[in-house]
Image (cartoon, helix red, strand yellow):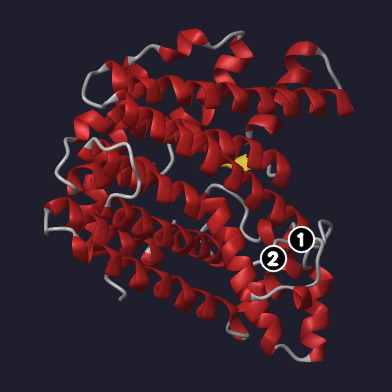
Amino acid sequence: MKRAQAGYEELLHELDLRKRRVSDFLRAGRYEEHFRPEHVREAVLSYIWAGGKSLRPAVLLLACSAVGGNEDHGLPAAAAIEVYHTWTLVHDDIIDRDSMRRGLPTVHAQFAQRAKEELGLQGTEAEHYGTSLAILTGDAQQAWSVALMCELAKNGFTAPETLISILQMLYWDVQNTLIEGETLDIQYSNRSFESLDDAVIADMLWKKTGVLYRFAGAAGAMIGLNVPSNDHPLVKAISEFASRCGTAFQLQDDILGVVGDESQLGKPVGSDFREGKRTTIVFYALKRASAKQKAHLLSILGNKSASQSDVVEAIHLLQTLGGIEETHALARSYVTSALHQLKVLPWTRSRDLLEQWAYYLVDRKL
């Protein structure tokens, strides 16, 4: 399955084109004028202008064209899903107590510091301001994503019934599943690995990540076909493809969080381990660990005061015990099963790009 990185040059070019289209769409709309006061405006735009991978918008647009639709018609929804995904990151950073995102301070960390510098707040009051602003930022971004979705019907290319179905799917099914996944992630961090297994962990990861990819595939196909139901065979095929790829994406993200390049990731390597995240990497490593190795790993896992040398040693153990290798094999299995879903689609350039994207998810280094 593995391809040389050079083999993805065409794909990365196509992804970048769609990323820029979404960015241009968001900038051209002068949406920033709606966010007040200044701190809220800057916080809402912070991650968006910093730029991420924008994979979910790209999947939506490619799904749209893969069923014969016009990607221009799906552009408001692609922009909406980028904004929607961003609010989950802002809130996730609060929950995970992360201080860095995309190489920059997280929203809550940035505005805690600015509360000290600009408002004269100190200590817990400054931290509370940063957290409060980050919560409000996520709320504003959710509202923005709704407004962007509504442009689907305003442009006349998408039937109101299709728009309503897409919105209901996002704000009823997807959002509640995301919240469930995030809650389980928190709960599992306080449970022993003996009470979990790889299927339970993978299901939690799907609820945190895969469900939004599934939505991107479904929404793109529904817009391309202009149908209000996600039961259409082509919609079901693409949404299931994107769903399984979403889990593979998160598994690879977990791997990169352990062995990735910190300068490329934009956040500290090993932070998830220090936070005590239950990943398949740790699960598989513990299965093979001796009693001494297991005790050592568990003494560092979730230990926020663990030294960097302790974390480096734990990462070495995760590699030695095969946790990373087995997790990568699991990610590849999700991609293999996902690719079968695309067989019902006629061959198009967009379908080919979706296939390349699936392979890329488990080969990427950032």
Q: Is residue 298 above or below residue 32?
A: below
Is mark 2 in CB contact (under 8 Å) with mark 1? Answer: yes
Instruction: Identify the residue at image location x=29%, y=40%.
Output: 222
Q: Which residue is mark 2?
A: 278
**Which residue occupies the extreme bottom position in the image?**
290
**Where residue 136 appears, x then y in whole percent?**
66, 22
Q: Nearer the viewer, residue 342 or 43?
A: 342
Q: Nearer the viewer, residue 158 or 275?
A: 158
Neighbour tally class for label 2: few under 14, some 14-19, many 20 plus, Cα within 10 Å: many
**Where residue 181 appears, x then y in whole percent?**
63, 52
Q: Where, quadrant-wise, is the C terminus in this rendering?
A: bottom left
Residue 264 in sight in this render: no
How far is mark 2 from mark 1, CA to CA? 6 Å
Q: Is residue 19 left or right of residue 326?
A: left
**Where residue 95 appears, x then y in whole percent?**
72, 43
Mark number displayed over residue 189: 1
